[in-house]
Image: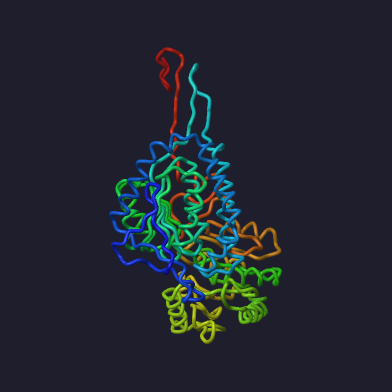
Amino acid sequence: MAERFKNLVAGRWEFPDENPPIESLNPANTSDLIGIVPESTPEDVDRAVKSARDAFSGWRLVPPPRRAEILFRAAELLVRNKQGLGELVTREMGKLLKEGLGDVQEAIDMAYYMAGEGRRLTGETVPSELPDKDCKSVRVSIGVFGLITPWNFPIAIPAWKILPALVAGNTVVLKPSSHTPVCATRFVEVLMEAGLPPGVVNLVHGRGETVGRELAEHPLVDGVSFTGSTKVGEGIIRSCVGVGKEVSCEMGGKNPIVVMDDADLELALEGSLWAAFGTTGQRCTAASRLIVHTEVYDTFLAEFTRKATSMRIGDGLTEDVDMGPLVNESQLGRVLEYVKIGIEEGASLTTGGNRLTGGRFDRGYFMEPTIFTDVTPQMRIASEEIFGPVVSVFRATSFEEAIGLANSTDYGLSSSIYTGDVNLSAIAERELDSGLVYINAPTIGAEIQLPFGGMKKSGSGHKEAGGKGGAIDMFTRIKVVYRDFSGKLQKAQIKE
């Protein structure tokens, strides 16, 4: 009998059965049923939102340091349960165990960091131009947030959204991906064990096109934070802006790594391999375009191809595996279709491009690491997000051409350059049109203490994660207070 993982509404766990349930399968071994969750109805979403609305009036008045204590306890619980949660991430999503543990570690880091924000929700105190008057700004809670999260970081991204929302005094309804619902449920269980009052966090399971849309468009939701595809995100932006809701959308990426002729080639190779094929290419920050200076192009491509073809593919819970499966059959089919498109467009398939079959591979969604050459910027494989282990390699004759190629897509999330020239790295830092820039490091590896987000079609609204300009700005509003204790009418900017 499959384990049932429930919705959480007003502090009560429940399993509505109006619709057939959703199965969560191990993508490395589809005979391994992780559990089942409900396909929620609009009525379930409505009750969850109203629960969050009812809880908001009390939660916003809890002093931020007291809210932070709960987040700190959650961090401690996550530390104690890290191994089991990391293994669950690998079983449900497919990434390697070391990556699954890293997923949980991001949630731990975010919980500790946002616990610290409980004593750092700062405004400003500034002098007044009038005597006996003071001026300040303070941060205030906003209300109820709908949080819609993807499957590729099934614990980390819910933590990125939930924890800053809570420390800022908001209440939330989480709609996790229907492909990794068990991870999200376990994370919410940790938050409840840490001591959150009923209704502060609510959880509804279901598919994005039904439950996610219902949550984003609910009239009692004050703001929406979404991570997922550009197409869905743009629809959410339109619906929220039209009614004045707060909105933050982190969307796609088509991230480049530039390798200059003076780069440390071994370092660039290792970084490119990790960025292209880590998490089976299923990261919004994955490097799907490598732009290599012509002087080192042949050497780089030969060695990169050799390393890619020697990668060990398999179940992420198995030792000595370099790359796991794609998350589900639909995603595998999408990536294979892009391989077909690339060949039809005239690109050269240097290696890979096939589903792996036979033996253990027949039980999961495994694919070869795939490299295309002879790619032009206009090709779909060079301009559209594939979200799989597929990379296009370009040749550049100069630094200026490389930067032009890097900036030639509609996306602008993450970019990287490998060079030993400090002046070139400074210019690249300025000219690369992306929210994240890495120097002599791959396009993946963001840390939670700085804002995370993209430019162009990669992101809209406030950034995720910590630091000035990050998530706290998303989940608070600034209120300005003027207090006049002169006992008489004073008129600013008016000379009597």
To which quarter of the image does residue 236 belong?
bottom left
Which residue appears farthest toward the front when viewing the image? 1
Q: Position of residue 434 (x, y in %)?
A: 53, 59
User: Is 281 placed above or below 166 here?
Assistant: below
Q: Position of residue 40 (x, y in %)?
A: 33, 59
User: Is 62 placed above or below 314 here?
Assistant: above
Q: Please name whichever residue, 487 or 220, is drawn nearer the observer in this view of the structure.
A: 220
To which quarter of the image does residue 401 belong?
bottom right
Identified at 70% across, 72% down, the residue is 266
User: Is 40 placed above or below 92 here?
Assistant: above
Does residue 456 appear anywhere in the picture? no
Quarter of the N terminus within the rendering: bottom left
Identified at 43% across, 51% down, the residue is 461
Identified at 69% across, 59% down, the residue is 422
Q: Please name whichever residue, 54 or 16, is drawn nearer the observer in this view of the structure.
A: 16
Does residue 324 appear anywhere in the picture? yes
Q: Please name whichever residue, 258 or 171, is drawn nearer the observer in this view of the structure.
A: 171
Rendered image coloring scheme? rainbow
Which residue appears farthest toward the top when viewing the image? 487
Which residue appears farthest toward the bottom when viewing the image? 358
Q: Position of residue 121 (x, y in %)?
A: 52, 37
Quarter of the C terminus within the rendering: top left
Residue 403 left/right relative to 456: right
Q: How many marks do you count on the picture? A: 0
